[in-house]
Image (cartoon, rainbow, N blue to C red):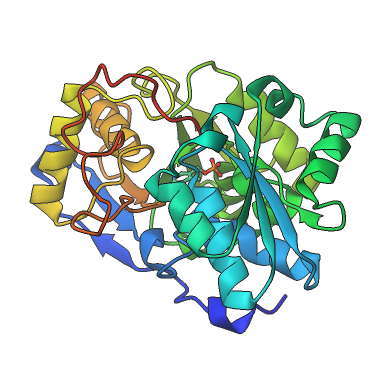
Amino acid sequence: MTSPDPLGPALPSPLQQTRDARFERRGLRLLLKRDDLVHPELIGNKWRKLVPNLAAAGGRPLVTFGGAYSNHLRATASAGRLLGLPTTGVVRGQELAGRPLNPSLARCAADGMRLHFVDRSTYRRKAEPEVLAAILRAAGAEDAYAVPEGGSNAEAVRGCRALGAELRGHAEVAAVACGTGGTLAGLAAGLAPGGRALGIPVLKGGFLEAEVQALQERAFGARTGIWSLDDRFHFGGYARTTPVLDAFAQDFEQRHGLPVERLYVAKLLYGLLALAEEGAFARGTTIAAVVTGRPFPEPGAPGSGPSVAGPGSPASAPAPPER
Ligand SMILES: *Cc1c(COP(=O)(O)O)cnc(C)c1O
């Protein structure tokens, strides 16, 4: 597969050594796999998942699905603008249709994505063929190439194998935050034999084990590689945060100069430190934390006022955004 040119990335993404006394004290090395630097607009794992789908789409318009703050919707909209492909985003939440767009959806619209809002119960049933067909008809996207919510299908999972392959010989454990689990499914398959992948789900519910396995079965025919999930670090669910998590993320930013994306990356890094402190990793282990994203809106960017995902959000922020 050749990557479309305007999407040409810098691969492999940088692998940075950190000096972090909290890990060093336990004989551990922490590396940051900077997938947030792969492409300026298609951030991190979204690039790895979308590019194979763009090849499969063969120049057809794209339609995909997401919540009001979806990183995947923004990445798809950017790809559409860069490649000159029409895109349609099916957004969860009919009630959003009458309101001003939030910064994430405004970015999608500015990139030319047509937004089609659907009520939550219909959205939930979009895997049913008749429901999907009706949504696509209503959105005027019947002929488009459909990328699933979060971008995770067999093509995407196979695309994420390269992430694991880039870590061969560098780390024994590769850790990633999980939404749909597509990135973990591919990462685990790409690691060297004996390498171990660890997923930190950011959604509550404990349903991901079966989904990651199903994604691997579709992409590779069987469960592949050594991987596990630790379900203890979702902090209440998608886009939920607590003062403890915010303080941790701010401190990490100061220690390492890394902008810490709050929906996923903060929970991953917090989970890794907690596991290190529990003694979950043998001394001498090198752990690569995959930095799958960066904050949006970027701090200081227009429209980057207090956002639900921003630092300093109260833990009790009402109506957190959904994926
Ligand atoms: C989408 C996303 C993830 C989750 O990827 P999945 O493949 O859906 O598990 C993790 N981190 C960031 C920053 C993301 O945008």
Q: In which quadrant of the rendered view does residue 95 lie?
A: top right
Q: Is residue 183 left or right of residue 284?
A: right
Residue 101 visible in the current orientation? yes
- Expressed as whole percent of the image width and height from the top left, the position of residue 93 reads 58, 29
Q: In which quadrant of the rendered view does residue 35 lie?
A: bottom left
Q: Is residue 217 left or right of residue 299?
A: right
Seen as rendered, the residue at the extreme right is 130
- Expressed as whole percent of the image width and height from the top left, the position of residue 235 reads 33, 21
- Expressed as whole percent of the image width and height from the top left, the position of residue 62 reads 72, 59
- Expressed as whole percent of the image width and height from the top left, the position of residue 289 reads 35, 48
> Which quadrant of the rendered structure holds the N terminus?
bottom right
Of residue 289 and residue 244, the one placed in the foreground of this image is 244
Of residue 148 and residue 217, the one placed in the foreground of this image is 148
Point 48% across, 30% down: residue: 322
Q: Is residue 71 left or right of residue 245?
A: right
Point 57% across, 71% down: residue: 81
Point 29% across, 27% down: residue: 275
Of residue 220 and residue 236, the one placed in the foreground of this image is 236
Looking at the image, is 192 positioned above or below residue 98?
A: below
Seen as rendered, the residue at the extreme front is 98
Point 62% across, 68% down: residue: 80
Residue 24 visible in the current orientation? no
Q: How many marks?
A: 0
